[in-house]
């Protein structure tokens, strides 16, 4: 499958392990800009009536290749307020590259497989009404264990249930297959295949209750190429990258 857009990059193909590490360089940059970050945070809190949560997120440090098809992603947790400051003030040059997790739902019905897309709401700030793969989500410090390994699959499983309305039990398998980068926003995503054995009709009867997306659709795996060509200008960059990476390994 040829690349149709240039605002994403497939960074690595294979199994992904996410771990924490120390990154004194980013800590130094954030410390230097502490006052500006805090001012932006306080102003945004006022704008939103105090309805803003300062959680944590993993910041990309590097990729370590364990073997040809196994990659260890090193990350360093930072506060969400720092990422918000970067979005509001790019001139600060904070160099933050957060890592999230995204899934490709592969719906298996009889002897055929389908990939599930849905349209983002019309009133969202980024990519309104664009096609997007579901589910996706952020990763926080609670996902990591005492050894520094981050269980992003558990997070993705929760997002699956929340965004589709289906119980977690319908997921047969979650397997990682790539790391991609949205070069528009410098956001990394770990990509996972979510295998679900269910009929399309019943799957979408659950999905209708979702508040996150509209107009869900199932595209046959052997028709993905045509779907991408017809809609590439209306697909979220990360989803474009996920599909490219998925089809490379399919």
Image (cartoon, rainbow, N blue to C red):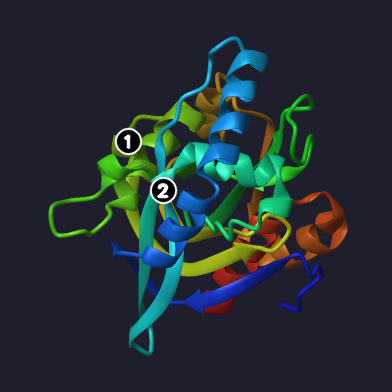
Using the rendered image of the protein, determine whether residue 99 is visible from the camera's viewpoint. Answer: no
Mark 2 closeness class: few <14, some 14–19, many ≥20 residues within 10 Å: many
232 sits to left or right of 213:
right
> How many discs mark residues in the rendered view?
2
Residue 100 x %, y %: 48, 51
226 sits to left or right of 140:
right
218 sits to left or right of 209:
right
Above or below 77: residue 180:
below
Task: Tell me the quadrant of the picture where the N terminus can be found.
Answer: bottom right
The part of the image, by quadrant, that contains residue 161 is top left
Which label sits on residue 28? Answer: none
Q: Nearer the viewer, residue 193 or 58?
A: 58
Q: Who's the residue at 51% across and 37% down the image?
A: 81
Residue depth check, mark 1 versus mark 2: number of the one nearer the observer: 2
Element at label 2: strand
Q: Which residue is mark 2?
A: 78
What's the CA distance linking mark 1 and mark 2?
29 Å
Residue 102 x %, y %: 50, 51
Q: Which residue is mark 1?
A: 168
Q: Who's the residue at 77% across and 61% down the image?
A: 228
């Amino acid at each position: 499958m040829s690349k149709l857009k240039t605002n994403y990059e497939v960074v690595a193909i294979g199994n992904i392990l996410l771990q924490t590490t120390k990154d004194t360089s980013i800590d130094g940059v954030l410390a230097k800009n502490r006052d500006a970050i805090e001012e932006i945070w306080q102003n945004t809190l006022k704008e939103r009536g105090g309805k803003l949560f300062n959680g944590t997120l993993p910041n990309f440090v590097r990729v370590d290749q364990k073997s040809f098809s196994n990659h260890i992603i090193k990350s360093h947790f930072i506060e969400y307020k720092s990422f918000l400051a970067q979005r509001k003030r790019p001139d600060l040059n904070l160099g933050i590259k957060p890592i999230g997790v995204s899934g490709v739902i592969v719906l298996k019905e009889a002897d055929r497989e389908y990939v599930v897309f849905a349209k983002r709401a019309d009133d969202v700030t980024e990519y309104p009404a664009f096609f997007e793969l579901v589910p996706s989500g952020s990763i926080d410090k609670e996902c990591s264990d005492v050894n520094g390994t981050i269980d992003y699959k558990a997070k993705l499983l929760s997002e699956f249930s929340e965004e589709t309305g289906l119980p977690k039990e319908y997921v047969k398998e979650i397997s990682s297959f790539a790391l991609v980068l949205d070069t528009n926003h410098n956001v990394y995503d770990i990509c996972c295949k979510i295998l679900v054995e269910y009929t399309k009709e019943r799957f979408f009867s659950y999905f209708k209750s979702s508040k996150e997306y509209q107009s869900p659709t199932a595209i046959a795996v052997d028709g993905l190429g045509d779907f991408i060509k017809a809609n590439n200008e209306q697909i979220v960059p990360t989803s474009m990258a996920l599909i490219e990476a998925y089809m490379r390994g399919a």
